[in-house]
Amino acid sequence: MTEISRRTIVKGSVLAAALAAVPAAANAASGPVPGSPLRTGIPLVRNRLTLPSGIATGDVTSDSAVLWSRSSAAGRMIATLRAVDDGGTVLSGRGAFARTLRGPRATQGSDFTAKIHAGHLPANTRFALEISFEDDGGAAGETITGTFRTAPDAGSTNGKGRSGGDLPPSSAQSFVWTGDTAGQGWGINEEIGGMRGYRAMHSTRPDFFIHSGDTVYADGPIAESVVEKDGQVWRNLVTEEVSKVAETLTEFRGRHRYNSLDTNIRAMLADVPLIANWDDHETTNNWYPGEILDDPRYTVRDVNTLAARGRQAWQENMPIADGSALWRPGTFDDGGQYQPARIYRKITRGPQLDVFCLDMRTFKSPNTDGKEPYATSILGQEQVDWLIREVSSSKATWKVIAADLPLGIIVPDGAVNQESLANREPGAPLGRELEIAGVLSAFKRNRVRNVVWLTADVHYCAAHHYSPERAAFTDFDPFWEFVAGPIAAGSFGPNAMDGTFGPEVVFAKAGRFPGESPRDGENQFFGHVQLGEDGTFTASLRNANGAVVFSKVLTPER
C-alpha cells in the first residue's frame, strides 16, 4: 500500500477507504484460523459508508433546496430536514416541520455523488439537515449534519418566518461571493490553517454564497512544496489527481475531491447554500468550444472532449438545480446519470432579490481581438433572450447578475486575443460587446431598475460604475459591477479598462506582485452584500482575514 503521510493522500480516497476498513480488519484479526469454517459465532462487522467530501446545499429558494453529498461506495442517499430556531432547537407545535427523503443511489457512474431536490418547503425557515447513505443491505452509514435557511417568501415584504420568535423582516438577507479556488499551484496549506478565506466568509453568517467560477483549477498542477518569492516554503496537501493537468474524467473528479479535503470549505458548504458558476479553469485556461490546444502538457488536445469531462465532474459535484441531473420521487433511480443541461438559471430569493446565474463559457465564440463589426457571442442568442425576458419580468427590488467574466476589464488571451468581451478599443461596441450592448439596451427599453453585476475571474477586487455619460455606447442606464477574488489562488492585477460602456474605477486593490500566494490573506478577496430592512444594497469588499477594504451603499430606484 502506498504510504500515507500528513501531506500526501494517494488518489484522494485511500485514507477514507483505509479508515472504513478498520472495523473489518479488526474482525478478521479475531476470526477463524485459515481453513476453518466461518461459523465462529462472532458477527461480521459491515464497512460503514462514509461521506468523504462532506455535504452541501445549493440553489436554495423560498420553497426548495438541492441537497448534495458523496458516498464512499454505492448506497442510497437519505436526507432528514427539521425546522429549527436560530439556536438549533427543533420546533414543535405550529412551527414544526420534519421530513425524511430517500433519494437516489449513488453509484460509480456518478463518482458516488448524489443530489435530492427538496421541494414544498416553508419560506424563511431554518432547517437542521442530516445526510447519510444506506448500503444495499439497508445499513445506515455515517451521518453529517448541516443547516440552511430558505429564502423569504416572494409574496411578502415583512413578517415572521416559522422559526418562532421575532425575526428580521422576511426580505432581509445577506450573501457573499468570490471565485478562484486552488489556483496557480496554491493548494491546501495546513500550516496556515488551509483555505482561510472560506472561514472568513463563513464567519459573516451569510444566507448563501455565489462562487463566480474557477471552482477548481483542472489545468493547474499542485506540487507538494513551492518556494515563494520571499523564500518561504509553501507546503501543499497533494493527491495523485492534482499532480498533472486533468484530462481523464477521473482526474477532473479528483480536482473536486481535492478541494473538499479543506476543512474550511466543508464547514462552510454544510452551513451556507451555494450558487455556482462555471468558468474556464474547470476545464482549461481561457478555453472556448471547438478549440484545439497547443499545449505540450496535454495528450488530449480537443477542448470539446476535455470540456465534456470537466463539465460532468463539475455538474456531479455542484448542488445545482439542474433538472436533468436531479432525482425526484417517481423519476429515474440513478441520480448520478450525467446529462448535459442548461446551467444558466434564475434563483428567486424573495421580494428583495433575484439572482441570474450566467453561463459565459458554453456558447462562447473563439477568442479573437474582438473587433468584428458584427456580433459574436459570449452568452449565445438563447441565453440573451432568456436574460432579457427574465430580468425584465422580475418583480424583485434587486436583480443580481452573477457573471463569470467581467464586462469592462480587459482580460487578454495572448498578445492580441481577448478572453472576455472588452476588446481594448474604447469606441462603439464590436464583436462580443455588441451582444452585451443589446442586453443593456433592452434593460433600458424595458425600464428595468436596480441591476447589479457581480463577478470574479481577474484575481483582484474592484468596484466599477458604468454610465452612458462616459461611454461610447450610450443606450443604457447606469449600473454597478463589483469584482471579488481570488479566495485561494494567486493574486494579479489590476487590469486596464475598456471605455465602451463608460466604466469608472471607483476602487481597486490587487496583489503586490503577479502570482502572490494566499499566505497572509491580505490580497485574497471576497464580496459581501447586506440587503437592509429599508431595501438598501450594501456591497463590501473584504480580504481573506475578514477586513473590509471598500463599501458602497446602493439605494433602490422605485
Image: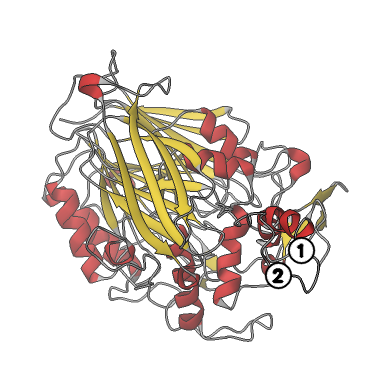
Q: Quadrant of residue 324?
A: bottom left
Front residue of 496 and 282: 282
Image position of 527 (left or right of 33): left
Q: Where residue 386 sits: x, y (%)?
A: 19, 61
Q: Where residue 50 sits: x, y (%)?
A: 57, 52
Front residue of 226 and 556: 226
- Labels 1 and 2 touching (C-beta < 8 A): yes
Q: Earlier in the sequence, mark 1 or mark 2?
A: 1
Q: Where residue 369 sits: x, y (%)?
A: 45, 74
x 74%, y 47%: residue? 189
Q: Name the residue under label 2.
A: 37
Q: In which quarter of the image is residue 207?
A: top left
x 42%, y 23%: residue? 88
x 43%, y 40%: residue? 130
Mark 2 is on which residue type? Answer: Pro
Instruction: For the N terminus, give its image quadrant.
Output: bottom right
Mark 1 is on which residue type? Answer: Pro
Q: Name the residue under label 1.
A: 32
C-alpha separation, residue under disc 1 versus residue under disc 2: 7 Å
